[in-house]
Image: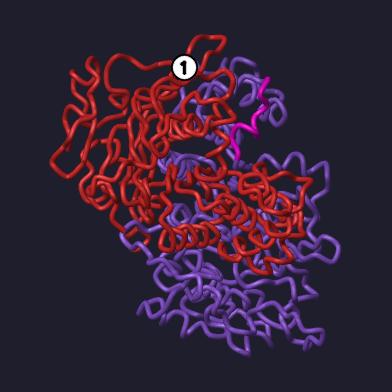
Chain colours: A red, B purple
């Protein structure tokens, strides 16, 4: 599955110089800082970072779901049209149909007092003007697509009657109803057991194989993202610090942060290590960022320049591999 | 059978433990020993009974039958008055570090509280010194004692949780998914801290997790639970080298491995499950048929079935890639699959062989 980027097709989603900030009692927090990234049709982009890296807020801004205390500047174009700051009525034409998002907690994303079938059908009645009858048939087909066993019976159940994995399948099914061109999956498996996680990843993999939908997969688990993504974007303290093809990034991470994350991916077939690999220090606090590289305090290869001068994202070589580091590995 | 260690008396000895909630059996016949300075990894999905087992051991919920011995004494017979005194030896670390700390209490007060309860005669300055020492010991600074939990990151909050549990120098520390809510990059910090504290204080650890990569780092021995039953028990390296239960293999195969990206499974193939694995829909159901609500894909671990439902055979049968008729008919006993290695699977020989020679897909349905 090669991204269309080389062929010159316009990106499905173009995020340009996006910044998101939150006003609080104690000042302003900059959650996302000048993030730029593109997602091409049929491409899967993995967004990796620790909590607080801005990975979720970037895509909440894309979806127009930022909290009232937040403001976003920059540009977000979906299929060529600017959607950042667009009026709700305009946003709702693409949101939930062509541009969809699946969240971490499938329980709080489903309405507890409505049967699953109603919640699914409602999407089609609203977005595609289908009759309820047609919409319920489509809902049944979509549940079968995401491998929900006994799909017909599930339509008549309430969310609390389903297991976590089943709920997340319903959420993914819901996001697929209107044949989206881009699905954003934000930590879709974090709340689930490893075995169920593997099943959900299989479903996403199959969805990619059978449609031209682009996927953005957001996770703190680089190993998980590597199993699906064509391209991986690593974020730290609100900025993109490295971006490359998945194989390229896994084979040759040039940013010390990416390299450190890679070391944390467990390898069950390798001999047991004396110490479990981890990254020293804490994820950065949005309050305490200096003028230099935000990763410098935790970076094993930081030098003086890193504390004073912030590195910009630039090409590492000709293969669309970019990193923001003064001393790339 | 789960052969016994030869060295010394176990600190914690659990035999044939059962925890039932009415007709529902949450823990079914679990037996293990845990020695000072050792870690037992308790592995399974949600609904496998691992947290219930831990709570029964701490006597937070009553055990239905079986025995628990702590330091050789009958722990279940311990009277309430003694229980409070002796609970200081058994402490717990929880999954959500922020939710398990009182948001209105300073970190220093949270750490001092166990000392106030269990060592009331300790003078305040000495207590403060113990708190400061413990904060430093878990990688925080004594100066942080005045802060409240929300001022800390998730990893730091878990360090506080560990400090609060360890300040009484317990003999047993029960850790229930202590790193599951943390960033991948931080998990190692907490795991390594637990390993260091164990080495220093000789604490026995009961480490509960569904994440085998984490369990592997800490455990000397691993017990795998499925729907309340012990399906495999082995020394850690043995379990990872030669998993003899299909459920253990499914857990191992589910750990994301960036070096091996699985191919997309076409939808048609996913539906092609053996007919007998599909839910029984006919009106006449043979006595040994799988219950109608046990579905093949994602057999909803939370949907655990009661002991009456599964009297017939192995509880894992609907999800098992190795299942045969025998598995549906008779409950597998604990087979000796190696040295100090027990597996409750009729087909354990083939199961181990397949793993070693990678002859199949090990994913559970």
A238 horizontally vs B351: left or right: left
How many callouts does the rendering have? 1
A66 horizontally vs A224: left or right: right
**Which of the 4 image quarters holds residue A105?**
top right
Find numbered disc 1 in the image and state the secondary structure of the residue it sits on. strand
Q: Is residue A327 above or below residue B74?
A: above
Letter of the chain that mark 1 sits on in the rendering:
A
B267 horizontally vs B148: left or right: left
Q: Is residue A226 above or below residue B110?
A: below
* Residue at screen point 73% across, 84% down: B289
- Across and down, in percent, residue A194 comes to 52, 57
- Across and down, in percent, residue A73 comes to 42, 20
Which is nearer the eye, A165 or B49? A165
* Residue at screen point 56% across, 64% down: A145
Q: Is residue B261 above or below residue A14?
A: below
Q: Quadrant of the N terminus of chain B?
A: bottom right
């Amino acid at each position: 599955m090669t991204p269309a980027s080389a062929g010159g097709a316009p990106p499905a989603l173009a995020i340009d110089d996006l910044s998101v900030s939150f006003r609080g009692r104690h000042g302003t927090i900059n959650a996302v800082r000048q993030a730029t990234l593109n997602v091409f049709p049929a491409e899967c982009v993995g967004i990796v970072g620790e909590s607080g890296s801005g990975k979720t807020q970037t895509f909440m801004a894309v979806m127009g779901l930022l909290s009232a205390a937040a403001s976003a500047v920059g540009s977000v174009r979906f299929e060529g049209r600017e959607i950042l700051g667009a009026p709700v009525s305009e946003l709702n034409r693409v949101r939930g149909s062509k541009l969809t998002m699946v969240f971490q907690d499938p329980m709080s994303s489903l309405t507890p007092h409505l049967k699953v079938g109603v919640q699914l059908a409602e999407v089609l009645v609203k977005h595609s003007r289908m009759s309820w009858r047609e919409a319920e048939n489509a809902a049944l087909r979509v549940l079968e697509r995401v491998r929900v066993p006994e799909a017909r019976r599930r339509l008549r159940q309430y969310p609390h009657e389903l297991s976590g994995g089943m709920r997340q399948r319903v959420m993914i099914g819901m996001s697929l109803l209107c044949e989206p061109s881009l699905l954003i999956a934000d930590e879709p498996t974090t709340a689930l057991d490893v075995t169920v996680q593997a099943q959900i990843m299989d479903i996403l993999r199959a969805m990619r194989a059978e449609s031209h939908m682009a996927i953005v997969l957001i996770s703190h688990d680089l190993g998980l993202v590597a199993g699906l993504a064509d391209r991986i974007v690593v974020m730290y303290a609100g900025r993109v610090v490295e971006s490359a093809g998945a194989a390229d990034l896994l084979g040759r991470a040039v940013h010390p942060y990416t390299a450190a994350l890679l070391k944390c991916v467990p390898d069950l077939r390798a001999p047991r290590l004396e110490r479990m690999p981890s990254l020293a220090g804490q994820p950065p606090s949005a309050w305490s960022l200096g003028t230099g590289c935000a990763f410098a305090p935790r970076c094993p290869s930081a030098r003086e320049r890193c504390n004073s001068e912030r590195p910009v994202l630039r090409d590492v070589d000709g293969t669309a591999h970019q990193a923001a580091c003064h001393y790339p590995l | 059978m789960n052969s016994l260690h030869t060295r010394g008396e176990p600190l914690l000895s659990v035999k044939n433990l059962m925890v039932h909630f009415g007709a529902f059996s949450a823990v079914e016949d679990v037996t293990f020993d845990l020695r000072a300075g050792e870690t037992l990894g308790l592995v399974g999905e949600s609904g496998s009974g691992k947290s219930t087992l831990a709570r029964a051991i701490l006597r937070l919920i009553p055990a239905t039958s079986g025995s628990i011995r702590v330091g050789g004494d009958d722990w279940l017979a311990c009277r309430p008055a003694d229980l409070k005194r002796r609970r200081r030896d058994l402490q717990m670390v929880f999954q959500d570090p922020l939710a398990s700390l009182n948001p209105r209490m300073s970190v220093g007060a949270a750490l001092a509280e166990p000392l106030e309860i269990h060592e009331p005669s300790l003078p305040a300055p000495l207590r403060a010194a113990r708190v400061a020492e413990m904060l430093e010991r878990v990688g925080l600074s004594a100066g942080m004692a005045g802060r409240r939990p929300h001022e800390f990151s998730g990893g730091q909050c878990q360090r506080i949780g560990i400090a609060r549990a360890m300040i009484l120098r317990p003999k047993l520390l029960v850790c229930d998914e202590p790193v599951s809510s943390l960033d991948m990059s931080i998990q190692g910090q907490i795991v390594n801290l637990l390993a260091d504290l164990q080495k220093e204080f000789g604490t026995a650890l009961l480490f509960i997790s569904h994440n085998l990569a984490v369990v592997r780092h800490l455990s000397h021995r691993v017990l795998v639970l499925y729907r309340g039953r012990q399906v495999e028990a082995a020394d850690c390296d043995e379990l990872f080298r030669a998993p003899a239960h299909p459920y253990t293999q499914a857990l191992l195969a589910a750990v994301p491995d960036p070096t091996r990206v699985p191919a997309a499974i076409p939808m048609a193939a996913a539906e092609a499950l053996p007919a007998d694995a599909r839910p029984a829909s006919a009106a006449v159901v043979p006595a040994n048929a799988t219950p109608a609500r046990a579905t093949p894909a994602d057999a909803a671990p939370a949907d655990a079935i009661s002991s009456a439902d599964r009297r017939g055979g192995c509880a894992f049968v609907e999800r098992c890639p190795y299942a045969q008729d025998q598995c549906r008919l008779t409950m597998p006993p604990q087979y000796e699959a190696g040295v100090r290695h027990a597996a409750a699977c009729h087909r354990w020989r083939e199961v181990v062989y397949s793993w070693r020679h990678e002859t199949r897909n090990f994913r559970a349905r």
